[in-house]
Image (spheres, rainbow, N blue to C red):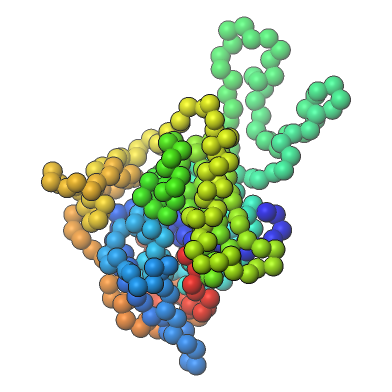
């Protein structure tokens, strides 16, 4: 969990989509899910990323659908449109990678990291976009029970009162760094709830409580992941061999890691009431069509309440990202995007896109 580095596969995708939503995209933005070819340069093979269901593409679909169904081709197109330098920066902000190679295959989780780093990154989504520092030790007490060290560095002087006699509620100042906009964090949590409700982890619906999370599986089923959370707990599960080798066809994150997560959470949450995810002020819930991402009409049946930021509305027209990229695309070694990271806690404005980073040929993760 701390030292072994493995490819996270699709469990990394939420951070690609979080970077997009933090930079002007919406959960209802439409991306083309269809075969795509990436030219990697002179003398290099053309990279053709595939979905897990190799013979099936869904066509124009929402960002939400791309995460819920874990679509590789949609994710590559999104990374191509957004620009890999932005994704690299967000991967660093979330603490997943220190220096992710800015090539398109990295958007599919082809870079290696640890389970602890991945679980900590999901903690940021669960905590409204605020930074979380992982620790193996919560606090240390001396022989008399006095706390001499705490991992939590926040100060609460009112909490130290020996007696409680009508004092006001103690104030605990939360000065943690804001990694992404809290609205973005909630939108991603809402999308990841959809993974459990309609996507690759529907086996967890039987827990009958609010859950968000994402499956991950790497090439040849060598690594399988599920990282999920409730409003108060984040749990990461990795299944694989010490020396990487295939687990066997069909042993995906949804089939192997997610049931382990479910078994643990069933015990951990026993006798506790379901708690809904906290919605930050300003979020608007608007009924939309799951297929089109447009505002639902009176006759639509396949609909959900989608989360929008204060300045967002569902699109009025059907516009598809990546429609022009269904043909071979020339890719440079670096996108050359001039990207200035947005201040913590703000939403960066949409950036100018240019050519994407090359694919490394290490595709085939989902």
Q: Is residue 303 above or below residue 60?
A: above
Q: Nearer the viewer, residue 38 or 185?
A: 38
Residue closest to the eye, 56 or 82: 56
14 to 43, vertically: above or below: above
State whether residue 320 appears in this view.
yes
**Residue occupying the far bottom of the picture:** 43
- Where in the figure is residue 22, as x and y percent of width and height? 42, 54
Q: Position of residue 248 (x, y in %)?
A: 55, 66
Q: Tell me residue 274's x, y (percent).
A: 46, 30
Find the residue positioned furthest to the top: 165
Left or right, residue 177 beside residue 345: right
**Is residue 32 left or right of 273 when viewed as pictured?**
left
Percent of width and height locating residue 351:
39, 64
Could you tell me how many numbered marks the image carries? 0
The answer, for residue 234, to whether it is visible in the render is no
Q: Residue furthest left?
A: 299
Displayed quadrant of residue 317: bottom left
Relative depth, front residue between 24 and 276: 276
Q: Quadrant of residue 135?
A: top right
Residue at position x 39%, y 68% in the image: 53
Position above or below: 40 against 277: below
Relative placement, left or right, of 49 versus 262 is left
* Image quarter of the N terminus: bottom right
């Amino acid at each position: 969990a701390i030292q072994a580095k493995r490819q996270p596969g699709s469990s990394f995708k939420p951070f690609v989509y979080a970077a997009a939503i933090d930079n002007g995209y919406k959960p209802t933005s439409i991306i083309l899910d269809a075969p795509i070819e990436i030219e990697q340069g002179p003398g290099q093979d053309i990279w053709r990323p595939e979905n897990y269901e190799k013979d099936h593409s869904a066509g124009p679909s929402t960002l939400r659908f791309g995460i819920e169904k874990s679509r590789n081709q949609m994710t590559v197109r999104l990374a191509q449109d957004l620009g890999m330098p932005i994704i690299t920066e967000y991967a660093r902000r979330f603490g997943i990678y220190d220096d992710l190679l800015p090539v398109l295959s990295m958007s599919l989780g082809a870079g290696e990291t640890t389970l602890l780093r991945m679980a900590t990154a999901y903690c940021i989504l669960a905590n409204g976009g605020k930074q979380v520092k992982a620790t193996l030790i919560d606090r240390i007490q001396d022989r008399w029970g006095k706390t001499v060290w705490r991992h939590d560095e926040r100060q609460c002087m009112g909490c130290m009162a020996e007696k409680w006699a009508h004092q006001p509620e103690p104030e605990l100042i939360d000065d943690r760094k804001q990694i992404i906009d809290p609205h973005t964090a909630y939108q991603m949590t809402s999308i990841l709830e959809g993974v459990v409700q309609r996507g690759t982890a529907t086996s967890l619906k039987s827990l009958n409580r609010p859950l968000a999370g994402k499956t991950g599986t790497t090439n040849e089923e060598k690594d399988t992941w599920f990282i999920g959370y409730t409003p108060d707990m984040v749990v990461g599960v990795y299944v694989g061999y010490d020396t990487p080798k295939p687990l066997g066809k069909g042993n995906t994150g949804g089939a192997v890691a997610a049931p382990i997560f479910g078994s643990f959470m069933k015990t951990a949450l026993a006798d506790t009431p379901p708690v809904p995810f906290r919605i930050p002020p300003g979020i608007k819930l608007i009924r939309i069509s799951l297929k089109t991402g447009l505002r639902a009409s009176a006759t639509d049946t396949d609909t959900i309440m989608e989360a929008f930021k204060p300045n967002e509305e569902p699109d009025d027209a059907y516009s598809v990202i990546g429609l022009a990229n269904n043909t071979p695309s020339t890719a440079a070694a670096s996108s050359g995007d001039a990207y200035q990271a947005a201040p913590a806690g703000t939403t960066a404005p949409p950036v100018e896109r240019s050519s994407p980073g090359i694919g490394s040929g290490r595709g085939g993760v989902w």
